[in-house]
Image (spheres, rainbow, N blue to C red):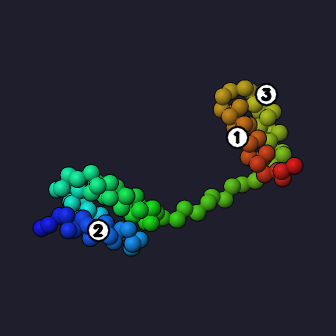
Amino acid sequence: MNYHVIGNALRTKFEKGVQVTQDDLAQMSQVASRTGRMQDRVLYSAMKRKYEADNQPEIEPEEVEKVTAEQLETAKAEAKRNSTAENIARYTVLKRQYDSQQPAE
């Protein structure tokens, strides 16, 4: 098996922007390990990054519950009454969420 020929064929395929498959990755991994050439290792790494980027599952943004002024005041009062790290952190997070909901001035 001529690994240089396989490597060049995969390089050409990659440079043309053709979809990278799992088989392409497996072959390029074998080429890179057998030849030991830095250019083959770099190509394998680039192909792997492209494969992973193309096959990432779509992540849907989570629905964030709106923070009301009443919730914010309750958290503030609790943080003042019992100033534990948890209560202060809870108030801080709610304050940031509340401020981000307000229209920019």
Residue type for callout 2 = Leu
Q: Which mark sits nearer the N-terminus, 3 or 2?
A: 2
The answer to whether residue 77 is visible is: yes
Of mark 3 and mark 1, the one earlier in the sequence is 3
Tag 2 secondary structure:
helix
- The reply, left or right, for residue 41 in relation to residue 86 is left
- Above or below, 30 against 24 in this view is above
Query: Which is nearer the N-term, disc 1 or disc 2?
Result: 2
Residue identifier under label 2: 10
Q: Left or right: where does residue 17 sit relative to residue 44?
A: right
Tell me: residue 27, above or below residue 79: below
- Could you say where residue 1 lies in the image, as x and y percent from the top left? 12, 67
Q: Are marks 3 and 2 in contact (CB under 8 Å)?
A: no
| Label 1 – label 2 distance at C-alpha | 49 Å
Per the model, the C-alpha gap separating discs 3 and 2 is 64 Å
Q: Which residue is labeled 3 in the image?
A: 80
Q: Which residue in the structure is indicated by mark 1?
A: 93
Q: Quadrant of residue 80?
A: top right
Say which quarter of the image contains residue 32.
bottom left
Q: Depth check: 61 or 29 in front?
A: 29
x 72%, y 37%: residue: 92
91 to the left or right of 103 = left
Q: Nearer the viewer, mark 3 or mark 1?
A: 1
**Closer to us: 18 or 54:** 18
Which mark identifies residue 63?
Answer: none
